[in-house]
Image (cartoon, helix red, strand yellow):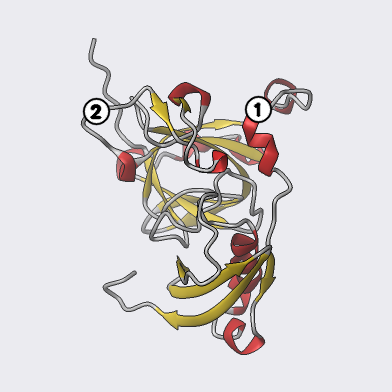
Amino acid sequence: MDIHYAPIAYIRTDFPEKFGIPRQSGRVPSLTGRIIFLPEYRREEALRGIEAFSHLWLLSDFSGSHRETWSPTVRPPRLGGNQRVGVFATRSPFRPNPIGLSCVRLVRLEKTAQEGTILHVSGVDLLDRTPILDIKPYLPYADSHPEANGSFGEAQRGHLLTVCFPPELLEKLPEEKRETACACLADDPRPSYQNDPERLYHMRFAGFDIRFTVQGHTATVRAVDACTEQET
C-alpha cells in the first residue's frame, strides 16, 4: 500500500546548512523559526484555538536526507560515530521514512496580507525551508514522562562548551542574534568523534559564517563574515 503525504507548510530558520543545528528541539530555547503555510492551507479556521497551547509538535520531512535505500543500523554521533545501533533506536534522519519530530514553543501568531497567519515558534532544530507535514498540540499530561529512560542520549544532556566569542567579532552579528549564536556553539555542533584542536569549523547562521576551533571544553570564535547571497 502506497501512502503519500504533501507538506502543509515550511519553516524559515537561521540555518541554511545542517551543521550547527541543535540535535534536539528545545536545546536552544532562543532559536526561533517562522512557520509559513502553503496557500491551500492558509485557512483561519484551521488554526482556531491554537493560541491556547504553549507548545506544539511539528512533524517534518527530512528533505536533506532522502535516500534510495535505507540501513537497519546507523552510527549515532553521540556514540562517537563508531558504534552501530538499530535505526529505530535513534532519531537519525536517515530512516525508511525520513520524518522528523520536534517539540517547539508557540511564541505568537502573526497575520500577514501576503502569507496568511504565520506561527512564530522557538526552540527549533530544523533546517531553513524544511517542509512541515503536520502540526499537533503538545499535551503535558500525556506527552511528558519525567521518569522515562533516555538510554545513550542521556549521556550528553548536560554537555556544554564554554564559548569564547571576542567582543569585536560578536558585534558583527545583529544584537538579537548574539545570544542564540553563543548558545548554538555551546551545544557543541561537532560530531563526537572529532576532537582536533587545530580544526577550523564553519557554522552558517543568520546570514553569517562563524568560524571557530574547539580545545578541550572551550569553543573559540576565530572569524565572523557575512555570507554572500549565493551562500545564503
Measured as percent of width and height from the top left, residue 78 is found at 56, 42
Distance between the alpha carbons at the discs numbered 1 and 2: 27 Å
User: What residue is rendered at 59% in x and 44% in y?
Assistant: 25
- Is residue 203 shown left or right of residue 1? right
Q: Quadrant of the N terminus?
A: top left
Residue 54 seen: no
In the picture shown, does residue 35 fall above or below 164? above
User: What residue is rendered at 42% in x and 81% in y?
Assistant: 226
The amino acid type of the residue labelled 2 equals: Thr
The residue that label 2 is drawn on is: 69
In the picture shown, does residue 122 fall above or below 103? below
Figure disc tally: 2
In what element is the residue under mark 2?
loop
Measured as percent of width and height from the top left, residue 8 is found at 36, 37
Q: Looking at the image, which residue sits at the far top?
A: 1
Q: Looking at the image, which residue sits at the far bottom?
A: 168
> Quick one: label 2, few (<14), some, or many (20+) residues within 10 Å?
few
The amino acid type of the residue labelled 1 equals: Ser
Measured as percent of width and height from the top left, residue 202 is found at 44, 69
Tell me which corner region of the image, top left, top right, bottom left or bottom right, holds residue 186: bottom right
In the picture shown, does residue 44 fall above or below 227? above
> Quick one: label 1, few (<14), some, or many (20+) residues within 10 Å?
few
The residue that label 1 is drawn on is: 151
> Camera-side residue: 61 or 94?
94
Cβ atoms under marks 1 and 2 closer than 8 Å: no
Q: Quadrant of the C terminus?
A: bottom left
Tell me which corner region of the image, top left, top right, bottom left or bottom right, holds residue 28: bottom right
Measured as percent of width and height from the top left, residue 196 is found at 52, 64
In what element is the residue under mark 1?
helix
The circle drawn on residue 228 is none
Residue 39 seen: yes
- The earlier-in-sequence mark between 1 and 2 is 2
